[in-house]
């Protein structure tokens, strides 16, 4: 199964770009929440949580393949972004389901 992850991001440039998109998603969500744009925040949070999970999976796969190319900073930073976006998405989904 090695090398079969063709759908994941490959290379440091793609991983860094994915991390920037995840960070922008978190900033957009926080900005929409701060401006009380509830509908926008509720749409942004789950969407960017999925993007962030995809990027995190890509970072993990690339780190496993080439430890030298993917820094620990990228791994831990993307992990933190993923955790924050997934927690906000979980809160939104809980509110949607009436919890």
Image (tube, rainbow, N blue to C red):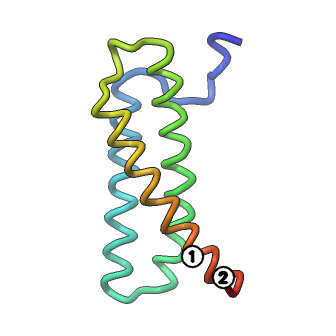
Along the horizontal axis of the image, is 61 left or right of 93? left
The crowding category of the residue bearing disc 1, from other C-alpha atoms within 10 Å (few below 14, some 14 to 19, many at least 20), is some
The image position of residue 66, as x and y in percent, is 43, 12
The crowding category of the residue bearing disc 2, from other C-alpha atoms within 10 Å (few below 14, some 14 to 19, many at least 20), is few
Along the horizontal axis of the image, is 40 left or right of 94? left
Q: CA distance from mark 1 to mark 2?
A: 6 Å
Is residue 34 depicted above or below 85 in this figure? Answer: below
Q: Residue at x 71, y 81 (%)?
A: 97
Hey, which quadrant is residue 91 in on the image?
bottom right
- Read off the residue under disc 1: 92
Along the horizontal axis of the image, is 24 left or right of 97? left
Quadrant assignment for the C terminus: bottom right
Quadrant assignment for the N terminus: top right
Q: Are marks 1 and 2 in contact (CB under 8 Å)?
A: yes
Given residues 88 and 32, the one toward you in this image is 88
Given residues 79 and 7, the one toward you in this image is 79
Q: Which element carries disc 1, helix, strand or loop?
A: helix
Q: Which element carries disc 2, helix, strand or loop?
A: helix
Numbered circle sitting on residue 67? none
Given residues 24 and 92, the one toward you in this image is 92
* Number of marks in picture: 2
Q: Residue at x 47, y 86 (%)?
A: 38
Q: Residue at x 32, y 34 (%)?
A: 74
Q: Residue at x 54, y 67 (%)?
A: 89
The image position of residue 39, as x and y in percent, is 52, 84
- Read off the residue under disc 2: 96
């Amino acid at each position: 199964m090695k090398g079969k992850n063709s759908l994941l991001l490959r290379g440091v440039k793609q991983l860094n770009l994915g991390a920037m998109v995840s960070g922008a998603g978190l900033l957009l969500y926080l900005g929409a929440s701060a401006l009380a744009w509830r509908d926008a925040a509720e749409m942004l949070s789950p969407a960017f949580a999925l993007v962030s999970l995809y990027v995190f999976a890509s970072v993990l796969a690339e780190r496993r393949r080439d430890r030298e190319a993917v820094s620990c900073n990228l791994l831990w930073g993307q992990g933190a972004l993923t955790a924050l976006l997934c927690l906000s998405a979980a809160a939104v989904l809980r509110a949607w389901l009436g919890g």
